[in-house]
């Protein structure tokens, strides 16, 4: 169910998804709003189009809905949603809920009548809404009544984040999440956002990213003039005023700003363009080009013609913009805001920069910083952008995976065939070099569901992955490589998953070890070295280091948990020496100081054994897997 495709440009990205859904089903029916305009997209052969006029319902029906909604508001659905979101019950939230209820009733009545007229039974279909809005609530009601069996919905940005709406209110989330078979989040940030607010339904929140088709990278030519591109609607949430003010501070060489996109509000768009003219037109070193609205295929052509040095987005809110995926497919670096799932496609310092100060001065500083990069640094960023798109936002991989979910072909996946309440959130890599059962027991004591994972194809299903290990460095890498885990772990980390290495698992995160000749995973720069034979005072030092030892906070140990006195159980002969001291989370002392824990972004490593460290280990897993993701959401 869609809001306008193929007659409008509101869902251009669904066109690529549809190509992959075809072939997984005997029949696909697209249900969309009726339009007298010609289709803007060619619907694939074998796809049936069913349009609804969304006609007004009778006054009597409206009164019935009003009375029923009033009762429901007092005693059930709306009050429950408002309580979860911390929103007030007032006239506006009541009217919003009523509008949802009325829309769902109207669309449902028309759709059932249409299906009945052609002899179709709703129960014969797998139902899927592209947006988690009124139609999703309608399908939740249908499933509750037994009219349908399978119902899936995507969540993006405005249909996900309650903060983007008056009084932080999105209606009937509880009802939708209760009855949907799966709520498909386009970002890991979105999935964690829902986990925090609706833990009762955490097993139904799954990561299913959008994607774009592969493109040939645009060669880097060291453009003169320099070029930046913004690609979005001209609407308040996109915050183009800040970008304009930032560009007004530009004092470098000639710079071209190209904007692709238009606004739904003609007056607002006119005001934005007027502001740009007033602040930028008189600057001899800045050229402005508004290209207006373009169909999707022309957008892709314009990106290639403009060949921008960097894409910039300064939005107040985002899910993960497909415009970023499109530019990344061409190998274009990105400057983007620290909102929603943007940090999952913009890895700060790797393929662009995350805007941490969204003021005009802060945005200008990042533009300045980007154009001050050396050529080899820009080339590396362009290569990283392409790799991230190919790894995480590849249309073929992502949409084929999604099609398998909808069609039930993921039944061989143990997570998908198990009962909802038993689905784990943590996967523990099983290579035969770690005590997986002990880790599972400690996680269980912390109330965290987990299971062993022997198939690298399945690790993307989990919110966190633990890499345990005991033994030799070379043997550890040999087993990871042989099972296909090395490549899978890299993909998982690039896509924003939380990786936790324990003991040997921590050492494998680094480049190399004195213990062997194999290359490590290289996720954290540095080497692993053997403890010396003598301590700092020249006395003999017994190696391996075995037993309990205290830990102290390093540069990364900034919050209260990491600063409190703790002790953990160690057993190791080698320890890590990170190249970047800022990655050090915890330190310890055994004859000499050594690093006992590290963190770089979503990659964590612990030299000790949390699973053998009693309540300290339990508290650590709780901090990592439960508390830390919530803190990240609050910071974003």
Image (cartoon, rainbow, N blue to C red):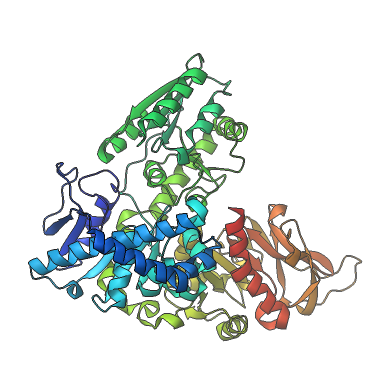
Report if residue 502 is visible in the image: yes
Which residue is at the front of the view, 348 or 384?
348
- Which picture quadrant has residue 249? top right
Q: Height in image: 351 above or below 220?
A: below
Q: How many marks?
A: 0
- Which picture quadrant has residue 628? bottom right
Which residue is at the front of the view, 413 or 453?
413
- Which picture quadrant has residue 329? top left
Q: Residue at x 45, y 73 (%)?
A: 76
Q: Position of residue 62 (x, y in %)?
A: 29, 61
Q: Position of residue 568 (x, y in %)?
A: 75, 77
Which residue is at the front of the view, 536 or 254?
254
Quarter occupied by the N terminus: bottom left
Q: Position of residue 51 (x, y in %)?
A: 16, 55
Report if residue 333 is visible in the image: no
Q: Residue at x 22, y 54 (%)?
A: 56
Which residue is at the front of the view, 413 or 106?
106
Q: Is residue 306 left or right of residue 574?
A: left
Q: Position of residue 377 (x, y in %)?
A: 54, 38
Q: Residue at x 66, y 59 (%)?
A: 527
Q: Residue at x 81, y 64 (%)?
A: 593
Q: Residue furthest left?
A: 118
Q: Is residue 195 left or right of residue 58?
A: right
């Amino acid at each position: 169910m869609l809001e306008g495709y193929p007659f409008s440009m509101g869902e251009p990205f669904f066109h690529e998804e549809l190509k992959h859904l075809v072939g997984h089903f005997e029949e696909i029916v697209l249900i969309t709003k009726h339009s007298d305009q010609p289709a803007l997209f060619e619907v694939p052969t074998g796809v049936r189009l069913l349009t609804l006029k969304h006609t007004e319902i009778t006054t009597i029906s409206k009164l019935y809905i009003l009375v029923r909604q009033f009762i429901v508001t007092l005693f059930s659905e709306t009050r429950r949603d408002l309580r979860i979101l911390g929103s007030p019950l007032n006239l506006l939230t009541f009217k919003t809920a009523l509008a949802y209820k009325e829309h769902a009733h109207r669309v449902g009545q028309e759709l059932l009548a249409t299906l009945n007229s052609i002899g179709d039974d709703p129960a014969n279909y797998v139902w899927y809404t592209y947006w988690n809005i009124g139609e999703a609530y309608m399908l939740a009601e249908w499933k509750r009544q037994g009219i349908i069996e399978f119902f899936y919905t995507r969540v993006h940005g405005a249909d996900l984040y309650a903060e983007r709406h008056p009084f932080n209110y999105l209606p009937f989330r509880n009802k939708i999440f209760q009855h949907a078979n799966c709520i498909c989040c386009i970002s890991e940030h979105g999935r964690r956002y829902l986990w925090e607010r609706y833990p009762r339904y955490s097993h139904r929140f799954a990561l299913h990213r959008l994607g774009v088709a592969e493109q040939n990278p645009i060669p880097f030519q060291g453009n003169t003039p320099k070029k930046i591109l913004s690609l979005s609607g001209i609407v308040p949430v996109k915050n183009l005023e800040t970008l304009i003010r930032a560009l007004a501070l530009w004092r470098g060489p000639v710079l071209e700003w190209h904007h692709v996109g238009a606004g739904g509000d003609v007056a607002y768009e006119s005001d934005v363009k007027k502001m740009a003219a007033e602040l930028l037109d008189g600057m001899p070193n800045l050229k402005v080009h508004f290209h207006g609205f373009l169909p999707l295929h022309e957008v892709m052509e314009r990106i290639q013609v403009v060949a921008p040095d960097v894409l910039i987005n300064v939005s107040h809110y985002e899910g993960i913009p497909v415009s970023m995926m499109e530019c990344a497919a061409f190998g274009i670096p990105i400057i983007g805001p620290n909102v929603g799932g943007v940090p999952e496609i913009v890895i700060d310092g790797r393929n662009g920069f995350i805007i941490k100060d969204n003021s005009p001065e802060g945005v200008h500083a990042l533009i300045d910083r980007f154009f001050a990069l050396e050529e080899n640094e820009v080339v590396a960023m362009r290569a990283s952008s392409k790799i991230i798109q190919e790894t995480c936002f590849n249309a073929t991989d992502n949409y084929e995976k999604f099609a398998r979910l909808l069609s039930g072909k993921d039944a061989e996946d143990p997570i998908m065939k198990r009962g909802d309440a038993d689905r784990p959130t943590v996967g523990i890599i099983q290579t035969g070099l770690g005590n997986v059962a002990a880790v599972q027991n400690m996680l269980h004591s912390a109330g965290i569901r987990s299971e062993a994972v022997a198939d690298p194809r399945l690790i993307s299903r989990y919110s966190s992955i633990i890499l345990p290990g005991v033994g030799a460095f070379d043997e550890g890498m040999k087993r990871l490589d042989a099972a296909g885990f090395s490549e899978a772990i890299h993909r998982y980390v690039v896509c924003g998953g939380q990786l936790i290495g324990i003991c040997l698992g921590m050492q494998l995160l680094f480049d190399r070890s004195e213990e062997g000749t194999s290359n490590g995973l290289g996720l954290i720069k540095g080497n692993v070295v053997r403890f010396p034979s003598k301590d700092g005072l020249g006395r003999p030092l017994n190696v391996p280091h075995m037993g309990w030892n205290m830990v102290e906070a390093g540069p990364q140990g900034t919050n209260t948990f990491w600063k409190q006195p703790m002790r953990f159980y160690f057993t190791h002969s080698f320890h890590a020496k990170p190249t970047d001291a800022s990655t050090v989370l915890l330190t310890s002392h055994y004859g000499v100081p050594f690093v006992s824990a590290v963190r770089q972004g979503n990659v964590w490593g612990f030299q000790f054994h949390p699973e053998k460290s009693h309540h300290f280990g339990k508290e650590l897993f709780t901090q990592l897997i439960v508390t830390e993701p919530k803190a990240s959401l609050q910071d974003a």
